[in-house]
Image (tube, helix red, strand yellow):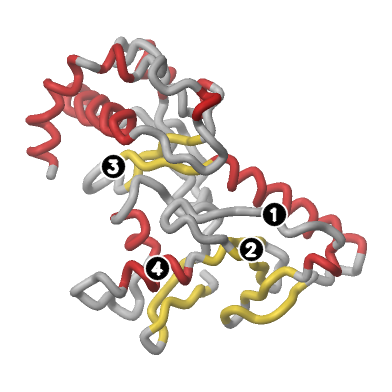
Amino acid sequence: MRRIRSAAAAIIMLVMAVTLSGCLYPKDKLGQFQKPPKDAIMNVQAVIDQFQKDTGLLPMQNSEADTPIYEKFKVDFDKLQRMGYISSVPETAYEKGGSYYYLIINEETDPTVKLMNLVIYQQMNDLQASIKAYSDAHSGKVPAGAELYPGFSTIDFKTLGGKEPDMHSMFSGSTLTPMVDANGMVYLDYGPDIMQLLAKETKKPADNEDLRVVLVNNSDFVPVKSPVYQLVNGDPQAVSK
């Protein structure tokens, strides 16, 4: 895969100034859940590959050790501009007022660019704040509803006193269900998405494998606010880590 990228990098870099300028993708045409143009992601990937080839490093922003894996390594567009690798930041990137973080995953083995949806991320942060406010006002009680997985429940929005946010999966377009653990931490349930993709896989994953990799490998996106999933009795199940 790395050899294929390197061979294509020279060609893609020729059109970098045009496509990374974002002029083709105005923000008013990017809906809340509309996916950005695939060539924008490919172009950033080519830049990342070239930067690593030239410097032996990856242009990533610093992060804390406990940052979740699919939020951890943001592309350092400022460094890429400063060093002349891009003329401008993609319009879809947060740094340009867009709705996505450009991330680097598999940084040690096969650095790959993926996107994180910031609309969903902010909705979940707002929901987390509401859960915390409720818990603080009710002696640590969590507004939990029906159990979805061991240790994870739906959120009782009637008890919480708010409307359930409308969030849709970047992988399937289906509605995402918010859930909460016993400590009041909020997550989104990607179990149905994982199940759909596993049905198409020919190789069965190991019982201890983190199934979120199935989502990432089959799309340009990372799951936002997702727990770890593992195979339990043949079904994907959220597990506490």
Q: What is the number of the mark on residue 112? A: 3
Mark pair 3, 1: CA separation: 30 Å
Closer to the camera in the image, 72 or 158: 158
- Frontmost of labels 1 and 2 is 1
Query: Does residue 107 sit above or below 147 in this rendering?
Result: above
Marks 1 and 2, Cα distance to the nearest angstrom?
Answer: 8 Å
As drawn, the label of residue 194 is 4
Image side of residue 162 versus residue 238, left or right:
right
Label 4, label 3: how far apart the Cα atoms are = 20 Å
Depth check: give the residue in front, 82 or 120: 120
At a point 46% along the width and 34% down the height, the residue shown is 62
Residue appearing at x 39%, y 62% in the figure: 212
Residue type at mark 3: give it: Thr
Earlier sequence position, callout 2 versus callout 3? 3
Q: Position of residue 227 (x, y in %)?
A: 52, 64
Answer with mark 1 or mark 4, whichever residue precedes in sequence: 1
Query: Marks 1/4: CA distance?
Result: 21 Å
Label 1 belongs to which residue? 165
Closer to viewer: mark 4 or mark 3: 4
Q: What x and y, as percent, mark residue 12?
A: 18, 23
Residue 105 image offset from top left, x and y in percent: 34, 45
- Amino acid found under the numbered disc labelled 4: Ile
Mark 4 vs mark 2: which is more N-terminal? 2
